[in-house]
Image (cartoon, rainbow, N blue to C red):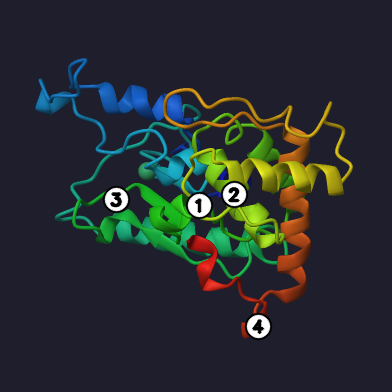
Amino acid sequence: MDLAFKKLEKAATPFKAYSGLRTFEEQNELWAEGRDADGTVVDKDKLVTKAKGGQSMHNYGLAVDSAPLKDPKDPNGNVWWPDPDVSTIWSSLHAAVVTAAREIDEGDSWDGIDYEWGGIWRFRDVPHVQVRTTLGELQAGQYPYCHDVDWLVKAHTTFLFDTPWMLRRVQYLLNMQSYPCGAVDGVLGKRSAEALNEFQADQKLDVEKPGDSVSPAPAGGHWAIDEQTVERLVRLDHEGMSLTRGTLPGDLLPPDDWSL
Ligand SMILES: [Zn+2]
C-alpha cells in the first residue's frame, strides 16, 4: 500500500496522501494524545485514535490517509476538509484512490487485493483507505499477498521486524513450512523454539548455533529473531503462494489440529 501510494503521490491527482506507514511506537504516541499515563481519557478534544500500536493497518504498511488539495497547483499541497455530511468529495476521492491503486498494482505489487474505505465505517474515517484485511487475520500471523517479494522482505525486516507482531508472523510462517509451532499466539513456547531451531538447521542459516536467535521474551512476549530467518521464511512462503495461489487443494491446507 505504501509503495503504491508513493507512486500515486507523483501522479497528477487533486489530493494528497499525507499519512501512510506508522510504526507501532508512533501509533502508541498518537493513542496517548488526550489520555493520561494510565490511559484514561482526560481531554476528549485531543483524542486522535482508538488504536494502539499494532491495532491499525497503518502499522503494517497497509493503509493510507489522503485529503483533497485546496488548489492542485499549490506547491505546498495544502489540503482541505469538506464536511463529510454534505460533501461527496470524500467518496469521489476514495474511488480515485482505489482506481489509482488498482492501476498501479496491475502486475506490479498487490494482486487480487481489495481496498476498503474508512468512510463507510461506523466510526467514520473519511481520509482512510486500506488493503482489505482484518486485524484478526494479522493477529493470526497472516499478511496480504503481494507480487513484489523484495518489498515484502523489506517490510518484514525493517518496520515490522522489531514488533511484538513478528513472533506471530514467524509462527504462522513456520507452520506453513511444516515446522509446527502450535497456536499462533505470539508467545515463545518450547514447541515454537524447537520448530525455529529445526528450520534454521535445515536451511543452514548462518546462526551461531541453532537457538541463539531465540532470546527470552521480555514483558509482552516478544521473541528476538534474526532478519535472515525472517527473510528466508518470507521468500519460501511467497514461492509457495505464487505456485498455489487460487488453486490450493484442500489436502494441502494446514490441519485443523495445529491450533491445539
Ligand atoms: Zn488512516
Q: Which amino acid does label 4 sit on?
A: Asp
The answer to whether 45 appears left or right of 260 in the picture is: left
Q: Where is residue 206 in the image (x, y as percent from the top left)?
A: 87, 33
Q: Which amino acid does label 1 sit on?
A: Val
Instruction: Report which residue position mark 4 lands on.
Output: 251
Check if mark 4's residue and mark 2's residue have beta carbons within 8 Å.
no
Q: Position of residue 219 (x, y in %)?
A: 42, 24
Return the residue nearer the eye: 97 or 209. Answer: 209
Q: Where is residue 43 in the image (x, y as percent from the top left)?
A: 11, 22
Residue 184's disc is 1
Q: Which amino acid does label 2 sit on?
A: Gln
Chain-order first, disc 2 or disc 1: 2
Q: Which amino acid does label 3 sit on?
A: Val
Q: How crowded is mark 3: few (under 14 residues within 10 Å), some or many (20 or more)?
A: many
Check if mark 1's residue and mark 3's residue have beta carbons within 8 Å.
no
Residue visible at 57% across and 25% down in the picture: 216
Chain-order first, disc 3 or disc 2: 3
Check if mark 2's residue and mark 1's residue have beta carbons within 8 Å.
yes
Residue visible at 42% across and 39% down in the picture: 54
Chain-order first, disc 4 or disc 2: 2
Q: Is mark 4 on a helix, strand or loop?
A: helix
Residue 171's disc is 2
Q: How crowded is mark 1: few (under 14 residues within 10 Å), some or many (20 or more)?
A: many
Cα distance in 3D space between marks 3 and 4: 42 Å
Residue 126's disc is 3
Chain-order first, disc 1 or disc 3: 3
Residue 39 against residue 190 in the figure, above or below: above
The answer to whether 130 appears left or right of 6 in the picture is: left
